[in-house]
Amino acid sequence: MAEIPVTQQEIDAVYPKVAETMADALGCDVDDIKPDVSLIEGLDAESIDFLDMVFRLERAFKIKIPRGKIVENARGDLPEAEFEQGGIVTEKGLAQLREYLSEVAPDRFRTPMKVADIPRLFTPTTFCKLVVRAQKEAAAAA
Amino acid sequence: MTTPAISAAAAMPAAKMRASDHFAAYSFVDRIVEFERGSRARGVFAIPAAIDAFPAAFVAEAVGQLAAWVAMDAIEFRGRPVAALATETQFRRDVRPGQTLQLDVGILSCDDEAVAYNGRASVGGSEVITLIDCLGPMLPVTDFDSPDALRERLQLLRAEGAAPGRFRGVASLPVNVHEHERGVAIRATLDVPADAPFFADHFPRRPVFPATLLLDAQMKLAATLVGETQGTQREAPRLLRATHVKMRSFIAPSQRLELAAELSPAGTDVVRAMLSAKTDGRLVASARVDLAARADDEELV
């Protein structure tokens, strides 16, 4: 499935509510949420927090975000076997990941990268893009 | 993003697990009287008259267990919710041994990843607790219990029901306060027992210290602090609500937990306690609890 493009303007429009929702889920001050901070490395988010954030974002924006499929979405049209081998993201996979997570600084894409470490790249902006895409999908389906 | 969200616990020696405690020592649904697959359920639990008390956290557990039955059935017992997030739990009234809880849950969403639900418990038609926007991460059921045993149990609960009076209470947990600023903050250790009947029920294949037992211990610390702000009073401070309840890790038998409760004002009539539990310096559970700032007569159902 082709990736739905998201503009910076669209990200900016949802960012305040996303930041507020994330701060509530993580129990931190909204000022601690920066658009490009790593949720895991910068805000100590754990897997349970990701589940919490997705759940809260769904309610806040009245959208449906497929849980557990963020990494799958990042893979895009690339078959799994081409995206990763033995739990390590391939060169092709990394290129796809860099494109999907264009908001993440290039130096954060370490090689070799484990598939399990992909969530370490996620930032509040990543979730803004998820929200915008979910809104667009819902609008298209309506 | 991938799950499981919860880290693993150490295994408990099987010899210490008594089969008779399964579906008894920490099970709070006697019968399911209405069941819409993957959608909603109503059930009952008779609080045994012989036990000393049935804290509010246990009532929340009862509601969560009913939701777990609906969730497990919805995904053909591939997974079960373990640990939880609870956005808001409203405590309306205390309950007493001898009373019967009417339980009601509505499933918001359910898949192999998580179950989201709302629920409530009532006694004699009066609501005693309301759970809003709860989320249970689903983990492989075979890690915790026998899928066949669970299926059979659900059939029993939906038919004639289980014999009431199975729950015999939970022995007091060893909570030792080591720092205490009256009316402000408490730090304490809780040594999770190595062996307890509830581990055979929660869960037979992998014992996990129940989140609601932890929450009960934490809420007692918060009530102690609030009581100290009220001077002399006869009744324990009234619980109003818990928010941001989040279990981050399994808690295994024999683990030592560092509990902390700290008060902060939350309004004219409300005091908020920030609760946390850590093990080896790592946060494993957190919650916020609001209690009535002024002592008033406890309204019992």
Image: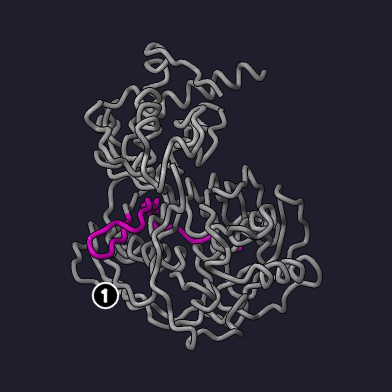
- Residue B124 x/y as whole percent: 70, 61
Say left or right for B21 vs A108. right
Above or below, A58 relative to A7: below
Chain letter of the residue beneath label 1 in the structure image: B
Residue B286 belongs to magenta span: yes
SS category of the residue bearing label 1: strand
Nearer to the camera, B102 or B154: B154
- Residue A101 x/y as whole percent: 36, 26
Quarter holding the C terminus of chain A is: top right
- Residue B199 x/y as whole percent: 49, 77
Above or below, A60 relative to B32: above
> For the residue carrying disc 1, how many other residues have a C-alpha within 10 Å: few (<14), some (14-19), or many (20+)?
few
- Residue at point 55% right, 50% down? B131
What range is drawn magenta here?
Answer: B275-301
> Label 1: which residue?
B176
Residue A27 belongs to magenta span: no
Q: Quadrant of residue B213?
A: bottom left
